[in-house]
Amino acid sequence: MRRNCGTLILLLLCLYLAGCGNRTELNELGITTATGYDGHQGHWTITYQVIVPSAMSSGSGSGGGGGGGSQGAVHTFSTQGTTIREAVAASSLEHPRKLYFAHTNIIVIGKEAAEAGIAEILDNYYRNPDARETVKVFTVEGQAKDYLKKLVPPEKLPGKALSNIMKQNQQLASFFPAVSIHELALHISSESGAAGVPELSVSGPDGAKLESVAVYQQTSPAGKLRISRLSIFNKDKMVGTLSKQQSLGLSWLNDQVQFTTISSDADSGLSAFQVRKAKVKVTPVKGPLHYTLAVKANVKAQLVESTSSEHISATPDWEKLLAQVESVIEAQIREGWASIQQTKLDLAGIGNKIHRKYPRDWNTLKDTWPEELAAMDIDIQVKVDLTRPGLFQDSFSRLLGED
Amino acid sequence: MFMRWLKKVMKSPQKGKRNKEKVNPSAQQSSGQAIHPSLSHTRTVLQRQMGDSPDFIIRNFRDQSGSDLYAVCYIEGLIDASLLTELIGVLIQVVTSPPADMAGEHTALSFFQSILPSGNTAIIQTQNEIYPAILSGSAVILTEGIPAGVEVSITGGERRAVGEPTSQTVIRGPKEGFTEEIATNMALIRRKIRSPDLRFVTHTIGKITQTKVIVVYIEQIANAEAVKEVNKRLRAIKTDSILESGYIEEFIQDAPLSVFPTMLNTERPDTVAGSLLDGQFAVLVDGTPFALVAPVTFFNFFQTPEDYYQRYDISTFLRIVRLISFMVSLLLPSIFIALTTFQQEMIPTTLLVTLAAQREGSPFPALMEALLMELTFEVIREAGVRMPRAIGPAISIVGALVIGQAAVEAGLVSGAMVIVVSFTAISNFVIPYVDMAISVRLLRFILMFLAGTLGLFGIMAGTIPILAHLLSLQSFGADYFMPYSPFYKSNMKDLLIRVPWWAMKTRPKVKSGDKITRQTPHQYPEGANNIISRVQDTDPSDQ
């Protein structure tokens, strides 16, 4: 009996040996909402934007309304090291909490790091279980550490806010693709080997003011963080940037447009259309000399605004509007295509499609692929289904003109 | 291993006791003496045996010459006063105008039996039979010169009236509960089931207490094997006292060391009646309003009698709510501990930040915090039960509020933990049967330790053995998880969902006996159709 009791106690103690050591209380965690990468292989500067939980709850507490702006909800600091993880380990020299990356919303890659190559960052994300591959990726014009210091008023957590901005853009405008670590890795490791990543910049003259909590007391801060361009990557290195319009064209070609608004300018007046559903089919067709890209876009849209003098409720004029939208979309796609041919980077994943469709040809093709891409023709067919004119028929301008 | 040791410890002395006690009652019986013909002799023997107890009364009836004729003995508090008066009246009549032939022993006794005011009479031959008779509330009439007596049952005395059950209340349904008096309880069941097939099997258990224990079942509807088994187990009990049905439950249940109850106890006659009609049996014990019901399954503990009186849809919903509450009450604190100390990545970011903000400056680890709060709650709860009724609820509410709020404001525990603990406690009260609620309370602490040391893995390592244990249990031949494992499709209609009564064609399998059919099938109410047909059939007077 005594032996049994002894064994029981030993077993209970084993429980503590096995588990209690790696227990982490919530107040021992430094929850990182955004991580920044600067530098290059052999010399990394990692920046962490750590949530300060006590500052977060001040809004709901009874401590008084004025106290909200006194403490920032995030704390940002940087560490250096020869490798990324060494830099993370160095954080223990200056930060009292264990850095916790499972809730990171975004990673920001500085220009230098992006141009030097991001393979090491990706490896770090895939190798470690505490880092999620669903994190959204951004690049920045200058140094990532400068951007992580900036706040995104009126939101409290900049990291979270930026990832929400990305989500909003994808759902409401589709200008830039929301790219996660995993998607980025898939794109750059595929046959086409190219990917686009949204780039952050500071708009307005006074970016430094965003680094202070005082910015929350301003109704309209002079500067703001915003997504401005698309950085393009060839393999793991950043090679250039594209404008918002070029990026939208790429979104069409990649069938990433979910919801966007298009303005068409005709002699009869301006009109705005809201795309509610778009399906773009891109197929490479083998020709005698080169491949031709057949693009078929099926778009469902509705009229949301018009100053047109056309008689909207009449079928012939309605057809005219349709033709306008179709030409605008075609022009956008063409702009995206032009940027692909210019940079000779397969940002629409056409190489993958050829590889899948004509695997034997691809073997001979892939060595000269950039040149082949530049020589390709495109055949665009846009079919717009304009479903609703809205609650109003002819435009208000036309109504006034009639009187 | 620990369980095996516990079993060994608990079994070995029991065996010895049983053997010893088997000898005793037989020895006692053999010493039964015939009643002495001399009344005065019997009187002194009785007085001595009862230790000159003040409530033991012997009334003598003498003729004019002063010689003894009859004596009536009884215990004052156990008999009904008006019946006694009637009995004495009869005896006085016999004394003043003695009937013609009272010569022979047999004629005298049968004469008494015919003129007495109670129908429940018996003839007593031995001295030892007198004691159980008077102790169970009968009067015994002894006659000078005859070596036998007549036992007349005039049971009565102070007892509690049938009232509303306090531990299992309903909004809709009968408001009567069992009392401490077994005869009343039998009558309460009889009034609900007016069938000659209703059976009562009496056992007298307890060498000193001589407690009446009655097994109730309905012939053919009850599972005959289970009834045979319970009678066998009841006969095997050799103890000196039974004061409550809990004694019986511990002696006869299938899994005596399990934290889960394998017999259900209820205070409500309608629950017992419903169980009997489902093919279960009940055990009534004299002196307690709580009856035992078996065979039961795990899911019986989540069904209230009200489920059958309310509409089927809300009953179904409430049953699911109760099962969820069971899970919450068992797992919520441990899941909270595991997630906040090990698997933080599973909490949504915003919630995590809120929780982290509350934990800023908390002095204790989450496990300690949870244990402290749970223990505090258990203390308040126990105090609430033990305290005098007038101040009990007030103190417990104030205690909970003050300790909960003050602890949060003083920064000793986080607000989220108070919410978790109090929600767990409230969920625990949703389980309709206290027995099941208690077992959850105990297991919760084990799971909290496992969660605090091993995280979610610990919770899995705790729940899998619990589930395996539940699946291994049996209650009088019925598997504890029965309609699911083993699977019986026809039992499903009264489990998580309760189908309307007209669709409940059969009784639950395994639990019940041969007569499985409950009612005629296809009794879908025609009311709605009638209205439609009335509208469609045009009334000739309209035209």
Image: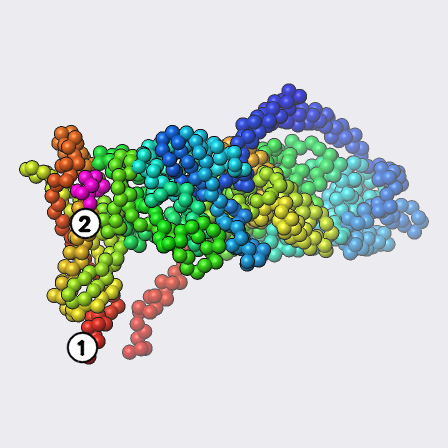
SS label for mark 1? helix
Q: Position of residue B77 (x, y in %)?
A: 79, 49
- Of the 4 image quadrants, the one containing the C terminus of chain B is bottom left
Would residue A341 be counted in the magenta stretch? yes
- Of the 4 image quadrants, the one containing the N terminus of chain B is top right
Amino acid on which the number 1 mark rests in the picture: Glu
- Residue at point 47%, 43% (across, down): A76
- Magenta stretch bounds: A339-348
Location of mark 2 (residue): A335
Query: What crowding class fits label 1: few (fewer than 14 Cα within 10 Å), some (14-19), or many (20 or more)?
Result: few
Amino acid on which the number 2 mark rests in the picture: Glu
Q: Which chain does tag 2 point to?
A: A
Name which of mark 1 and mark 2 comes first in the sequence.
2
Residue A383 vertical position relative to residue A371 in the rendered view, above or below: below
Q: Position of residue B473 (x, y in %)?
A: 53, 33
Q: Nearer the viewer, residue B472 or A330?
A: A330
SS label for mark 2? helix
Is residue A330 among the parts visible in the rendering?
A: yes
Q: Which chain does tag 1 point to?
A: A
Location of mark 1 (residue): A402
Q: Nearer the viewer, residue B479 or A292?
A: A292
Tell me the distance, in whole angstroms, between the alpha carbons under discs 1 and 2. Answer: 39 Å
Q: Position of residue B173 (x, y in %)?
A: 56, 56
Q: How is the image coloured?
A: rainbow
- Residue at point 84%, 40% (across, down): B50
Query: What crowding class fits label 2: few (fewer than 14 Cα within 10 Å), some (14-19), or many (20 or more)?
Result: some
Is residue B113 among the parts visible in the rendering?
A: no
Task: Work out which residue is located at the far top of the displayed protein and give it.
Answer: A3
